[in-house]
Image (cartoon, grey):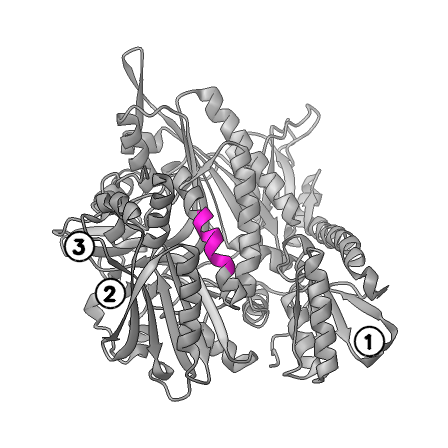
Amino acid sequence: MKLTVEWKENPSEEELVEWLKSYLDFGEIVNDDFPAKGASSWYPYGYSIIKNILRLASFLIKNIGFEEIVLPSFVHGEDFMKECRNIKDFSERVYWSPLYKEDDLHVVTPTIEAQLGSLYAKWLSQDKRLPFKYFTIRGVGRYETGKTIPLWKERNVWPFFEGLTAHNKKTDFTVTIRQQVSFMKTFFKTLGIPVLIIERPKISRRLKEYSEKRIEAITITKDKRVVILANIYDLGEIFSKVYDITYYFKNAKYYALTSAIGLSGRVLAALLVINGDRDGFVIPPSIAPILVAIVPIYEKAALHKMSNILKNYLSKNGISSEVFNAKSSLGERRRKIVAMGVPFLIEVGKEEIRSSMLYIKQRGFSTTIQTKIKNLPRTIKVQSKILEKAIKTKTMEQFNLLNRSAKSKEEFLHFVEDEFLTKAPFCDKPFCYEKAAECTGKEIIGRAYNIILNDRTKCVNCGKSAVQSLYFGVKWKGEK
Amino acid sequence: MLNIPKDYSLPNLYYFSSDILVKIRQQLAKLLPILNRAGFRECHFPFLIPRSILLYYDNLVPLKDFIKVYSGKNRRSHAYLRPDGIFSQGITLAGKIIKSYRDLPLKLFEVSPGYRKRKIENKRNIFTNLEESFSLQGGLFTEDEKGKEYCQSVLFEIFKNFSIRHNTKKTRFYKTEAIQYSTRFDESDIEIAKLYIFNQEVTRQANIYFFNKAGRSDFPYMYTFSLSQNILLLKILAEEGK
């Protein structure tokens, strides 16, 4: 199979999406031939990668005190409509079902808030004590009417990792928000996805509708477009008032403070896009389900036997590998393995058997390492660490090239015109940053999270003392 | 005793708390290696199924037996939720894999929510819920007719591992040849399970369906099997009771 998608060093958004879509299938991550819009099927290889990512996220979020639960796929229509009536109406953007009766509708849950909000209210009425910190991993349904992209924007969103917390103490609530930010930082750092943490306070008026503050982990892709990878919502008392999540203290009734966190399969899409090259994906060894691809160079029993011996030898040493049998040409198999992003490739031929010497090719770098068969497991383990570091370094270098920090108006205008993700200091007057956005035609992505500027820092627009660093850039189409 | 909370405001919907989830995962950890050893690889499919996919079955199953969902409150269009016993979505991916590069037999499975239509007036419990969060479904695609024995041997190994006594019943599933396994635990276990099954001592918990080329001449033979979440829950109950 040949791919017709051409690789470009500086692709447009459309070209990058086309590249991603074609390699998602050829690289065995997901297939979107399923005859329903915005619904992808996960190949076993892609499924193993996302499971490794979810395992990491679960481990980290449990470390900050969250517990995992399994929720039903539905929320009762009445519970869902409370959110629509009081916070934001998206009743036309979800799937409704007459589960039992035509006049009693349920909703395929699009997010956790309505569902867990109702449950929290019930728990509190049964004398359960705050705080509540729960998360779940599942599929959700969103009736997206625009263009859908596998892993990026789908109707049948899987996996969707989300949590909801409820608190009776402001300090506990604040600490939890900080812990969630720390979770995001560690998660993306471990995966090797460079991110910036930004907050979106009430710069944008529409955000008032459903959160007091929104904290996001964002990154920038090769097409110089900003992508949101994870969100934390400071919901304050907004949902508590709607769902009656209340507690009593000294006979007085109070509304609980709530926060939500969410991320999806888009994390994998970003990882693939950021690390990918003209030949396909580059999967970091730490999350690769197949660390070594073993390729008998042609159809011969001795080569297959040797390949399987190597596989078993690696397996006994805790290294995952797969034999890519000689049913198709050597070139086709190489293309497939490289596109899948398998970190190491070993070809097995007569010469390798005779000399007991193997040549290990690294994905993403043109390095070939020579090793004796008996040393293979040790070599792979050592090289995995080196490759992991090299991939992360390369990604960070690329990320640093795409985002800039402006100190003057001239620098700001220059960087923004070149579509870099640009950070610049601003005063607190909406006139200054709104004018900057209007003049440049770029969007305010958000405010740098928890950054305190020194007194000498000046607003790039008016020259007065700056109080915040704002990011300007261009988001992926359809990104809110 | 197994403490599975009833739903909060919905009839017949349940959630699993973290301690039950741990127990379910422990049971799955016994089950998944059996499938892996047999060469089945885990994947994942969408839970929404368009009508066109259901027609792969050549109208074997009446559409009224599936749960319908509408897009938007104004009901602009509709799809269905995947059932809990048939590996319906696997056909699309299997077709793609087989066509592009892989050899037969192809073995896939998934553990994910499955849905079965229920009437609200019937008294229901966790074992007869309309949604199974951990429904296991698998598919074997082969060029010959030996798949049935292969699927059967996998299910038997699972039954053996779970100490499940079973009865085999050959039947017709609409126009399809099917084998259903009625399963039961030891008498002592049944006493505990009874509380939840309302004296329904023997329940159908596993199936193998044989789809002759899935109704398509260009397709290999397809065998699908499914295992109910109830097996995991009953096993937890049995272990808790000891």
> Residue under mark 1: which chain is it in?
A
- Looking at the rendering, which quadrant does residue A97 occupy? bottom left
Specify whether disc 2 shares its chain with disc 3: no
Residue on which the image places disc 2: B66
Residue lying farthest to the bottom in this orientation: B217
Q: Tell me if mark 1 has few (under 14), some (14-19) or many (20+) residues whose alpha carbon lies within 10 angstroms of its own.
A: some
> Residue under mark 2: which chain is it in?
B
Q: Position of residue A101 (x, y in %)?
A: 14, 55
Residue plotted at (33% across, 73% down): B209
Q: Position of residue B206 (x, y in %)?
A: 33, 63
Q: CA distance from mark 1 to mark 2?
A: 56 Å
Q: Position of residue A189 (x, y in %)?
A: 65, 44
Indicate the amino acid at tag 3.
Tyr
Q: CA distance from mark 3 to mark 1?
A: 65 Å
> In screen coordinates, is A217 left or right of A480?
right
Please, what secondary structure does the residue beneath circle 2 have?
A: loop
Q: CA distance from mark 2 to mark 3?
A: 12 Å
Q: Which mark is residue A100?
A: 3
Q: Nearer the viewer, residue A210 or B211?
A: B211
Q: Which mark is residue A353?
A: 1
Indicate the amino acid at tag 1.
Ile
Q: Which mark is residue A69?
A: none
Cβ atoms under marks 1 and 2 closer than 8 Å: no
Magenta-highlighted residues:
B25-33
> In screen coordinates, is A364 left or right of A51?
right
Residue plotted at (71% across, 25% down): A456
Specify whether disc 3 shares its chain with disc 1: yes
